[in-house]
Amino acid sequence: MKEFTYTIEDPNGMHARPAGKLATYAKQFDADIRVHAGEKESDGKRLLALMSLGATCGTELHFIISGSDEEAACEQLERFCRESWGRGE
């Protein structure tokens, strides 16, 4: 299992476009990708599930990745978040 945290810096939060990009990117991996925002959890490969997190600017997203390609998925998803939405933690 691999994990990383990313804090949303976009003033609009995680609306449909960035959530869709994240879900599409996550689908290329076989690993299970869970995204937590506070007490809420979603499947990182499902657009509506990601949007249901209600993640706004300043929300800390915690990614938990497990499966056969978890190492690559973690590294690439973390890079994707940082490059797509600014500086993470």
Image: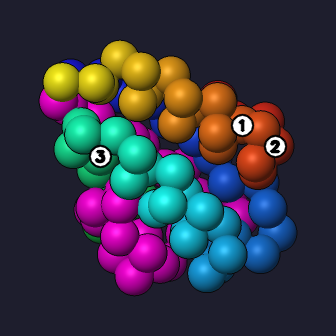
Identify the residue at horizontal 24%, vertical 40% (top origin). Answer: 30
Residue 46 appears in which quarter of the rendering? bottom left
Residue situated in front as seen by the camera: 1 or 41 = 1
Residue 80: x %, y % from top left:
64, 39
In the image, is residue 54 part of the stretch drawn in magenta?
yes
Marks 2 and 1 close (CB-CB < 8 Å): yes
**Disc 3 element:** strand
- On the rendered image, what quadrant is the N terminus found in? top left
Q: In x, y percent, where is residue 11?
A: 82, 69
Q: Which residue is mark 3?
A: 33
The Cα–Cα distance between marks 2 and 1, rounded to whole angstroms, is 5 Å
Q: Earlier in the sequence, mark 3 or mark 1?
A: 3
Q: Which residue is under mark 2? A: 86
Query: Residue 1 vs residue 85: left or right?
Result: left
Identify the mark at residue 82; answer none if there is no mark: 1
Q: Tell me the distance, in whole angstroms, between the alpha carbons under discs 3 and 2.
A: 21 Å
The answer to whether residue 28 of the structure is visible from this angle is: yes
Mark 3 in CB contact with mark 1 (< 8 angstroms): no
Give the color scheme: rainbow, by chain, secondary structure or one colour: rainbow
Left or right: 63 as drawn, with respect to 51: left
In magenta segment, residue 57: yes
Q: Nearer the viewer, residue 74 or 9?
A: 74
**Which is more toward the observer, 38 or 51?**
51
Give the position of the C terminus as an image quadrant: top right
Which portion, as a residue range, is magenta? 41-67
